[in-house]
Amino acid sequence: MPEFSQRARSLPASPIRKLVPFADAAKQRGVRVFHLNIGQPDIATPPEFWAAIRNAELEVLAYSPSAGIDSLREEIQSYYARLGHDLQEQQVLVTTGASEALSFVFTALMNPGDEVIVPEPFYANYMSFTLGKDAKVVPVTSSLENNFGLPHVEDFEKKITPHTKAILICNPGNPTGVLYPREALLRLQEIAQKHDLFIIADEVYREFAYDGNQHTSCLSLQGCEQNVIVVDSISKRFSACGARIGCVISRNDELMSLVLKQAQARLSPPTLGQIGAAEVYKLPSSYYAEVATEYASRRDLLKAALDRMEGVVCPEINGAFYAMVHLPVDDAEKFCQWILEDFDHQGSTVMMAPGGGFYATPGLGQHEVRIAYVLNREDLSAAMDCLAMALQVYPGRIANPLAESQGV
């Protein structure tokens, strides 16, 4: 048989989806599975999205322009203008989700052997997108003890080599829930300008900032406009993951021309998804405030429940809808499989994402899980009851030095 590519063989399995067969088997046994493994919101997609599609009056579902339909690009520009960022039409390109946006950006920037520095833990698919371009993720480690705050400038500079092309951040963070303040972004700007690097900012969760905190976009960094690339999506903001509509935004004209060539090669993003997206971008600020309030309430419930569990350490969470949680278990992946295979509480169990898959440094994340608090409060509370009971009876429970050192 002919050989498959080494590039494809090197891609890691998704920590978010790899345990799906065990969840499916639990459901076949009649066990209810609370899905806290994946960032799939249960909040209803805005009715404006569906109305726009129903009223489209299309005779032919045709290709759209490769850069996206004009009405959507104009609404994205208007949305950013309300945030204080004036953009030109050519500085916005619509993609098939943020995943395609990142893939286009990496193709535009990376030669084989090039490197992108990423604070870890990070969204696991960053690794696949990078390896798919024969490039390399270089991690700079953040810590739970510091609430996964941005590492120091010196930590980044130790990782920079002649092959470094960019620094990639997610703000607010997936999987950590951290929200980087403006001061942290200014430190990134200092590094990027000093070493002539791109800053790639995944800002998909920008509207989810809690406790009076405000999100600062990298588009606001003055003096390095040519270095900044923003990736965005409607998936989480408008609870429309299946629409597959994202975008690349940059004031670097050459970068955008390289991205456009790739967009032309894949023809067009989904036409119906764009029609719906153009309408939801018109929603008033009250929509975002209402959704953020709901997630903040879920965050409060989740953190209070985790803080009551002996040996569990949950950091402060001030953005997105994730928490990277330290558990008193021998191995988080084993625990996540065990709780699906061998445990249920009152007919229910919990699916989580093992933490190791969100790190590039071997051995890190072994005692951590990512929890996505995307379920309503009633289901989330029941899921936390399941987790608490599971930790009490798990045969691989261990003493927790991290919790003890923090006085938990």
Image (spheres, grey):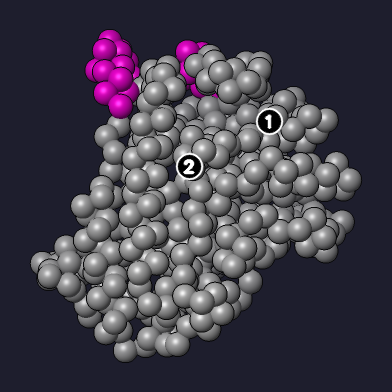
Query: Which quadrant holds residue 142?
Result: bottom right
Dot 1 lies on which element?
A: helix
What residue span does the magenta drawing correspond to? 46-73
Residue sitting nearer the eye, 287 or 228: 287
N-terminal-most mark, 2 or 1: 2
Q: Do we see residue 191 in this rendering?
A: yes
- Residue 57 within the magenta-colored segment of the rendering: yes
Three-letter code for the amino acid on which mark 1 is drawn: Leu
Three-letter code for the amino acid on which mark 2 is drawn: Tyr
Circles 2, 1 touching at the beta carbon (< 8 Å): no
Q: Do we see residue 204 in this rendering?
A: no
Please tell me which residue is depicted at 67% across the width and 49% down the height of the picture.
168
Please tell me which residue is depicted at 12% across the width and 70% down the height of the picture.
346
Please tell me which residue is depicted at 33% across the width and 63% down the height of the picture.
305
Q: Image height check: is 4 above or below 49? A: below
- Could you say where residue 212 lies in the image, as x and y percent from the top left? 52, 38
